[in-house]
Image (cartoon, helix red, strand yellow):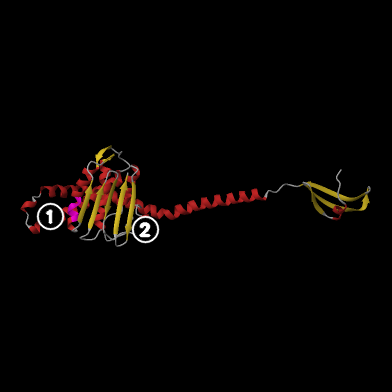
């Protein structure tokens, strides 16, 4: 038996507890009944759950739509990178024979029999061949890095650094650079020799390439750190933040593909080497590796 307050019967529709009621007066009274009452159980409405479900549906649709839009927008960029990678592979293959021939013939030349004019020409040839050879080695590393496993061994970094400095000495002489070298003897590190040479070569070649004529490059090797400082054009903080992107080049007047720092990043990541780049426009750059 349902009991209603006297005021409830004056309403056509109202709620009580978990039920809803519709009241209609009966005229004329039938079997002594003055009102007809329809009762229906209310379905609970959880607004918070409905909002959460709706939000999840909207977010899911947004993520899926964004994913396909991003793929669509990035497709031309991926295609361009694929074309560039193919170009580098073909270029590397074509460079192999002429580079080997040039380097082999330079070694056979007798510099003592050359006059001063011929000696200057020979020095320029050596510098150019060194640059091309270094670029070739970078391209080979870029193409084969994921195909060749590292042959780690205990390396004498002091000896390797001296060898690489001798390798770049001609390029430094052409720009009349003063190399200030402070190398601690007997510094060793367990790594792949080819990768460590690529790491050192890229840091040295960048310093030589981007520094000004007749300035000083400082090369310091301690037990747990290696640093190279130049007095070149320097970089802004925005440029430093994107320097490790492959094919990123800040100075279009200089040669190269913009892969040097990308190679540096892959090597230091493999051997847990930390890098710190300090640079200021028009004042120079200092690159420090610590392990």
Direction from residue 270 to residue 33 in the image, left or right = right
Q: Earlier in the sequence, mark 1 or mark 2?
A: 1
Of the pair 243 and 235, the residue shown nearer to us: 235
Range of the magenta residues? 167-172
Direction from residue 178 to residue 73 in the image, left or right = right
> Can you tell which quarter of the image residue 73 is in?
bottom left
In the rendered structure, find residue 122 and report the number of the disc placed on it.
1
Direction from residue 121 to residue 28 in the image, left or right = right
Q: Is residue 155 visible?
A: yes
- For the point 25% across and 49% down, the residue is 220
- For the point 10% across and 47% down, the residue is 108
Residue found at the far bottom of this picture = 282
Residue 140 at x, y percent in the picture: 27, 46
Residue 145 part of the magenta-drawn span? no
Residue 261 at x, y percent in the picture: 31, 51
Residue 171 part of the magenta-drawn span? yes
Q: Is residue 116 above or below residue 273?
A: below
Q: Which residue is mark 2?
A: 237
| Mark 2 Cα shell of 10 Å, populated few (<14), some (14-19), many (≥20) | some
Quadrant for the N terminus in the image: top right
Q: Is residue 236 above or below residue 200?
A: below
Quadrant for the C terminus in the image: top left
Residue 155 at x, y percent in the picture: 25, 39
In the rendered structure, find residue 284 and report the number of the disc placed on it.
none
Mark 1 to mark 2 CA distance (whole Å): 40 Å
């Amino acid at each position: 038996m349902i009991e209603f307050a006297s005021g409830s019967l004056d309403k056509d529709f109202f709620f009580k507890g978990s039920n809803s009621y519709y009241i209609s007066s009966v005229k004329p009274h039938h079997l002594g009944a003055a009102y007809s009452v329809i009762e229906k159980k209310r379905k609970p409405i959880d607004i918070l759950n409905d909002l959460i479900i709706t939000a999840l549906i909207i977010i899911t649709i947004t993520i899926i739509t964004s994913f396909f839009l991003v793929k669509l927008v990035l497709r031309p960029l991926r295609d361009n990178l694929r074309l560039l990678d193919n170009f580098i592979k073909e270029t590397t293959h074509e460079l192999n024979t002429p580079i080997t021939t040039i380097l082999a013939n330079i070694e056979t030349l007798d510099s003592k029999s050359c006059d001063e004019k011929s000696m200057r020409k020979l020095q320029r040839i050596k510098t150019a061949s060194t640059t091309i050879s270094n670029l070739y080695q970078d391209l080979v590393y870029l193409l084969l890095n994921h195909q060749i496993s590292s042959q780690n061994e205990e390396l004498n970094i002091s000896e390797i650094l001296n060898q690489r400095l001798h390798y770049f000495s001609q390029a430094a002489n052409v720009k009349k650079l003063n190399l200030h070298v402070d190398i601690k003897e007997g510094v060793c590190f367990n790594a792949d020799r080819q990768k460590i040479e690529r790491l050192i070569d890229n840091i040295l070649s960048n310093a030589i390439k981007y520094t000004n004529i007749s300035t000083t490059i400082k090369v310091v090797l301690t037990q747990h750190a290696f640093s190279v400082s130049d007095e070149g054009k320097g970089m802004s903080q925005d440029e430093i933040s994107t320097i490790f992107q492959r094919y990123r080049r800040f100075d279009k007047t200089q040669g190269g593909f913009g892969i040097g720092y990308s190679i540096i990043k892959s090597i230091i990541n493999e051997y847990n080497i930390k890098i710190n780049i300090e640079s200021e426009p028009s004042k120079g750059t200092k690159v420090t590796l610590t392990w």
